[in-house]
Image: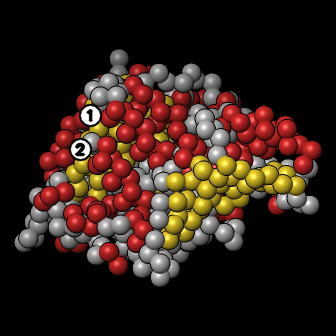
């Protein structure tokens, strides 16, 4: 028979884990297979200052009330304060939440190991440094570790970001995947415990838990659950690689994932980038949710910049699927020179907006100001699937052209979670406004030629406004001294491409035919990114290191064109990277 003390302890712990311990109720909560408990929390900040528009225009004085309404800070603090928490691992692009930081320092003072992986552009932020020092908390600094990742300042040429967003609290004495624990006693202890981890659109910032429109899922799982182990694998891979090591991260994560003993879940799948051939591709999750929609696709997006994503959405519209998108209103602007704040976005966001609008998508915009963003990133397909997580809908985030940002994303089939996201999307839609009502709606019709490649901002193109210099997201890391393409009026001039694997300087295997295929795939990606296609190519020039390979090259080349464009081919004494072939093309838009 259990003692009264035992049952009192159970009741107290249950209350601590329940929403009753928090000031705000979750948007939705439930339990999935294998005792996976979840809570869904949305930021829907309510703005109380004079002149606000539909509760979607907040200022700094609204921060505290918005944070209390969402309850996200409280939940994270509760996890940090939990008596069974032995380690906390976090990965974020930015970290600036002071109440959470103080709770982490208190945990570190108790002996909890606290590790923060942060994008290197934010490693010197005062709150990151304050977490590292934990001044005023005795001995806490010995238990806190800051690890910078990523490359280059945000927005700089060649930069890629640590954009994964996870807060993970472990009850294990060894906060690593079970496959990495050799000690039988530690293994048994870890196996008996639970792991708590988040998936969010938000960074761990003050705004990410308050004024931004965001979504957070809080998972509480047995440590041997596949999702818990996969999240531990993310941190294991981050810990084993340096700050500029995307390919090694991909290999480490994939190897760890293959060693998880528990079977993958049928209801929730995790995608992580960078990835290699042993890990599922984030783009496959995107393709699946778009393909399975029969009636409607509900999209909430802060940024959408690549034809690799908006063109499939347009294809679904042509198949009779209703596509409705809630954007932040910054997508109508391209920086301060176009009437927007510093957080405004670029030309490719504007292009996506126009392409979707012209195809018949139903678009609306959350009217925000510099201290606020509609920062959600999710898609709901009918009542079947939800795609939710950290990445914006960009090529770099989805690693569509080689290795891009570090990101995490979930594809979810749980019906209660899907229903909650549908409800949340409709609430966002009610807060948003359509273009005719929007004060910056006229910006959407500015000629795209007014924008240059430098961040998509107007005013930096040559004096001839019909010229634009264009770069591929995946090529920026290479630091090459030329543009991927130059558009003059409705003509696109594509630079010479060799058969390098996207995002690297490594040539594709397979000799002249393997390189020819990769070269044309690279050209095809450039054309589609900038609004053209292989069917619109009118002229190509081919350079061969050995003119004797002309016939073998042609066998591959002819498969890429329904109507062969005009062409010249010539032998060269040498090509960049030691390539066998280089091809440049001209196409119409």
* Residue annotated with mark 1: 322
Relative to residue 112, is residue 357 drawn left or right? Answer: left
Seen at 27% across and 42% down, the residue is 360
Mark 1–mark 2 contact, CB under 8 Å? yes
Q: Residue at x 27, y 67 (%)?
A: 443
Image coordinates for residue 462, horizontal then vertical, percent:
50, 79
Residue at 21% over, 63% down: 441
Q: Residue furthest top?
A: 1
* Horizontal relation, residue 335 to residue 135: left or right: left
Looking at this view, name the residue that lies furthest to the left.
50
Tell me, for residue 362, which label it has, or none: 2
> Could you say which quadrant of the image residue 33 lies in?
top left
Kind of element beneath mark 2: strand
The vertical placement of 192 against 27, above or below, is above
Q: Secondary structure at mark 1?
A: strand
Compare residues 509 and 87 and report the one nearer the observer.
Answer: 509
How far is mark 1 from mark 2, CA to CA?
8 Å
**Of 355 and 80, which appears nearest the observer?**
355
Horizontal and vertical percent for residue 162? 55, 58
Residue 184 is situated, as x and y percent measured from the top left of the image, at 68, 30
The disc placed on residue 259 is: none
């Amino acid at each position: 028979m259990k003692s009264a003390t035992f049952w009192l302890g159970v009741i107290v712990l249950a209350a601590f884990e329940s929403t009753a311990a928090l000031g705000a109720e979750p948007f939705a909560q439930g339990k999935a297979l294998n005792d996976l408990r979840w809570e869904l929390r949305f930021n829907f900040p309510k703005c109380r200052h004079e002149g606000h528009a539909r509760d979607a225009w907040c200022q700094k004085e609204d921060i505290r009330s918005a944070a209390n309404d969402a309850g996200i800070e409280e939940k994270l603090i509760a996890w940090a304060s939990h008596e069974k928490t032995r380690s906390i691992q976090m990965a974020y692009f930015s970290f600036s939440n002071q109440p959470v930081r103080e709770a982490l320092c208190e945990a570190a003072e108790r002996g909890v190991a606290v590790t923060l992986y942060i994008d290197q552009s934010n490693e010197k932020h005062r709150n990151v440094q304050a977490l590292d020092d934990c001044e005023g908390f005795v001995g806490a600094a010995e238990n806190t570790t800051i690890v910078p990742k990523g490359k280059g300042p945000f927005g700089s040429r060649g930069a890629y970001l640590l954009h994964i967003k996870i807060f993970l609290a472990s009850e294990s004495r060894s906060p690593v995947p079970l496959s990495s624990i050799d000690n039988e006693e530690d293994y048994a202890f870890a196996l008996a415990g639970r792991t708590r981890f988040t998936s969010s659109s938000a960074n761990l910032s003050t705004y990410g838990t308050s004024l931004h429109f965001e979504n957070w899922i809080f998972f509480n799982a047995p440590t041997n659950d596949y999702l818990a182990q996969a999240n531990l694998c993310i941190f294991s891979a981050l810990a084993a690689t340096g700050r500029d090591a995307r390919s090694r991260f991909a290999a480490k994560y994939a190897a760890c994932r293959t060693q998880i003993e528990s079977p993958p879940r049928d209801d929730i799948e995790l995608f992580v980038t960078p990835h290699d051939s042993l890990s599922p591709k984030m783009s496959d999750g995107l393709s699946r949710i778009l393909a399975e929609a029969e009636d409607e696709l509900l999209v909430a997006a802060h940024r959408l910049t690549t034809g690799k994503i908006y063109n499939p959405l347009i294809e679904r519209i042509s198949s009779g699927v209703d596509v409705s998108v809630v954007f932040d209103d910054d997508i109508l602007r391209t920086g301060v020179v176009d009437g927007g704040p510093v957080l405004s976005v670029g030309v490719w966001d504007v292009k996506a907006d126009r392409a979707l609008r012209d195809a018949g998508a139903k678009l609306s915009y959350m009217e925000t100001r510099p201290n606020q963003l509609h920062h959600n990133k999710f898609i709901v397909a009918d009542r079947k699937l939800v795609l939710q997580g950290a990445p914006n809908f960009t090529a770099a985030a989805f690693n569509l052209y080689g290795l891009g940002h570090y990101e995490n994303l979930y594809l979810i089939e749980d019906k209660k979670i899907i229903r909650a996201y549908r409800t949340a999307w409709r609430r966002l839609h009610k807060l948003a406004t359509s273009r005719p009502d929007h004060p910056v709606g006229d910006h959407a019709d500015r000629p795209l030629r007014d924008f240059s490649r430098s961040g998509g901002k107007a005013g930096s193109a040559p004096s001839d406004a019909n010229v634009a210099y264009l770069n591929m997201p995946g090529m920026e890391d290479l630091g090459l001294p030329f543009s991927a393409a130059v558009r003059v009026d409705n003509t696109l001039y594509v630079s010479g491409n060799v058969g390098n694997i996207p995002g690297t300087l490594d040539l594709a295997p397979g000799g002249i035919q393997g390189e020819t295929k990769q070269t044309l795939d690279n050209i095809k990606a450039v054309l589609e990114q900038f609004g053209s296609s292989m069917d619109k190519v009118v002229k190509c020039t081919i350079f061969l290191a050995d003119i004797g390979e002309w016939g073998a090259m042609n066998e591959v080349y002819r498969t890429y064109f329904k109507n062969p464009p005009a062409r010249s081919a010539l032998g060269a004494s040498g090509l960049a990277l030691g390539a066998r072939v280089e091809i440049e093309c001209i196409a119409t838009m």
